[in-house]
Amino acid sequence: MLAGSLLFGASGGASNVVLPPFTWSMALVNAAQLGKSWRPGCPVAPSQLRLLELRYVGFDGRARVGTMVVNATVVTTVVKVFATLYAKRFPIHLMVPTSNFQGKDPASMAANNTSGFNCRYAVTTGPKQWSVHAYGEAIDVNPLQNPYVFNGVAQPLAGKAYINRRDVRPGMAEVGGVLNKAFASVGWLWGGRWSVSPDYQHFSSTGG
């Protein structure tokens, strides 16, 4: 297991609450831990994945600790992004692996869960193809505030209140905003740029 911490100033941001240092740790993960978020035939093996424990700021402005599974190759990148979000006090509702939801993405989204790896196919009208999440190289952030929108319908359904992206509220992704800039700084691309079916929660290393 690896771990680290970074100390940030106690003032500034959306809250006057004093935050402890940003901390993170990394551990190996096995098939049993991944549960139904992984199965034989997935494009990556459990040995290629890592379980991250990350400190984040909740919507109440207080520090919390969450967990997320990502590809071992993007650990440093993901830690950098979430260290930035913590320093800027960007609020996150929940952060647990999709195995907590039996690998069911709709359930994870409905819980407004920020997550990484999930061995599933991409949501597309074309031929079946693995989602970038199936490689552990994509992260969905605050699905309620940042829904996937197809034919005017938000997923999760409660995300309907956030389809209007001009009404910027806490936890939302926006061009030039804290969340987008944090991911852009490490070269990750935003699903909100897709014109036909914008996926405002989605950030990935490949742009897919």
Image: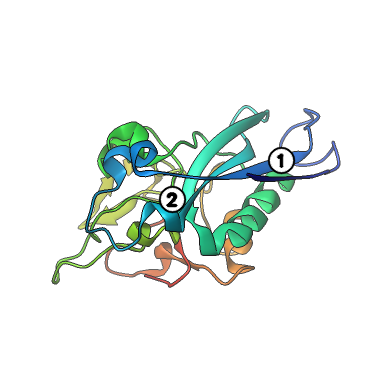
Q: Is residue 166 visible?
A: no
Q: Position of residue 129 (x, y in %)?
A: 21, 68
Measure the C-alpha gap from mark 2 to mark 1: 18 Å
Q: How many marks?
A: 2
What residue sits 58% from the left and 55% below the top?
A: 179
| Residue position for label 1 | 23
**Quick one: label 2 or label 1, which is nearer the N terminus?**
1
| Residue position for label 2 | 116
Q: Position of residue 187 (x, y in %)?
A: 57, 72
Q: What is the image's colouring?
A: rainbow
Q: Is residue 95 left or right of residue 54?
A: left
Q: Tag 1: residue type?
A: Thr
Q: Is residue 124 visible?
A: yes
What residue sits 54% from the left and 62% below the top?
A: 74
What residue sits 71% from the left and 47% below the top?
A: 88
Identify the secondary structure beneath mark 1.
Answer: strand
Q: Position of residue 84 (x, y in %)?
A: 69, 53
Say which quarter of the image contains residue 194. bottom left
- Picture quarter with the C terminus: bottom left
The front one of 42 and 59 is 42
In the picture shown, does residue 35 fall above or below 44?
above
- Picture quarter with the N terminus: top right
Q: Is residue 84 left or right of residue 70?
A: right
